[in-house]
Amino acid sequence: MTGTNVLRGVAVAGATAVLLAGCGSASERAADDNGGGGEGVATLRVGATPMPHAEILEFVNDELAADAGLAIEVVEYTDYNQPNAALTEGELDANYYQTVPFLEEYLAGNQGADLAYVADVHLEAFGVYSESVEDLDDLSEGADIAVPNDSSNMDRALRLLEAHDVITLAEGTDGQASESDIEDNPLDITITPVEAAQLPRSLQDVDAAVVNGNYALEADLPETANALAWEETEDNPYANGLVVRSEDVDAEDIVRLNDLLHSQEVRDFMEERWQGIVLPVGGVEE
């Protein structure tokens, strides 16, 4: 996947200079940082995709961070691979956009990365959307369905289609199914892998698409397209959470940020802002 990151609220050139200067661990930077958020305030640079992750972080920064001695500088990315690379290289203190399966896939292909998943924060249910079909039962023979092209999200999309009897996957492919693992395909559906961020745009060219929750929200699909099916949320392993370099898992400022992300205020914000599409996960931190 490709894409460019966008820094909110500051000029790109100036923000880039700040990021490149910001090496070292989160705890080391916090000890030295009295400038970004005021005296005694630790500034954390956190990478995120725009919706809902960046919005959640901005809510935390605007409403909660100062009282916890934090300031959050949100660095937006429009693809899924750059935030882990930037975190590994020390340009970020944390990122917030991914699932455990996605992180595991990234680490398997990037042996030099030493990243750790801190905790689940929220779940975005995958949905099957269409501009031309009103019900899954209306799919025609030979219909074309777009799915995310990265392996962890492709597996998740195919599981959703299997759960609704569109296809059947071969046994023993849990967590790694691709289109070649489709064992039964009664409608002779064509599966078309597409970069996740481009799935909403693909709706004009396919019969349906299985779209990641954040990209569906950005494209306003729940309001503008037909939602044909939803992913089950109970015992769902695909929650999104906070990720840091392994050395920073127990850093005081990371612990404080994680606590804020699990606060009642953030839970209420998610529930009111996204009406059940973005679901808070984990206990409330007092």
Image (cartoon, helix red, strand yellow):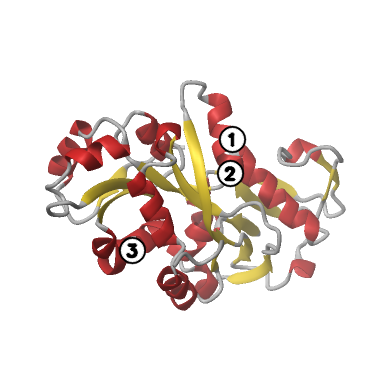
Q: Secondary structure at mark 3?
A: helix
Measured Cα–Cα span from mark 3 to mark 2: 23 Å
Judge by depth and name the residue closer to the eye, 256 or 14. 256
- Image position of 94 (left or right of 98): left
Q: Is residue 2 left or right of residue 4?
A: right
- Location of mark 1 (residue): 104
Q: At 50% from the left edge and 51% from the top edge, which residue is drawn? A: 241
The amino acid at mark 3 is Val
State the residue position of label 2. 100
Question: On the image, numbered disc 3 is attached to which residue?
Answer: 60
Q: Residue at x 13, y 54 (%)?
A: 38
Q: Assess whether mark 2 and mark 3 are in contact (beta carbons under 8 angstroms).
A: no
Counting residues from the start of the chain, the first of labels 3 and 2 encountered is 3
Which quadrant would residue 170 be assigned to in this image? top right
Vertical position of residue 209 compared to residue 155: above or below: below
Q: Is residue 38 left or right of residue 129?
A: left
* Residue 57 % position (x, y): 35, 59
Is any part of residue 77 visible from this angle?
no
Q: Nearer the viewer, residue 281 or 9?
A: 281
Marking on residue 28: none
Mark 1 Cα shell of 10 Å, populated few (<14), some (14-19), many (≥20): some
**Rendered location of residue 198, percent (x, y):** 49, 50
Q: For the residues marked 2 and 1, what is the alpha-carbon distance in whole angstroms?
A: 6 Å
- Report crowding for label 2: few under 14, some 14 to 19, many 20 or more residues within 10 A (C-alpha): many
Give coordinates of residue 100: x percent, y percent.
Answer: 58, 44
Pinpoint residue 128: horizontal percent, then vertical percent. 65, 62
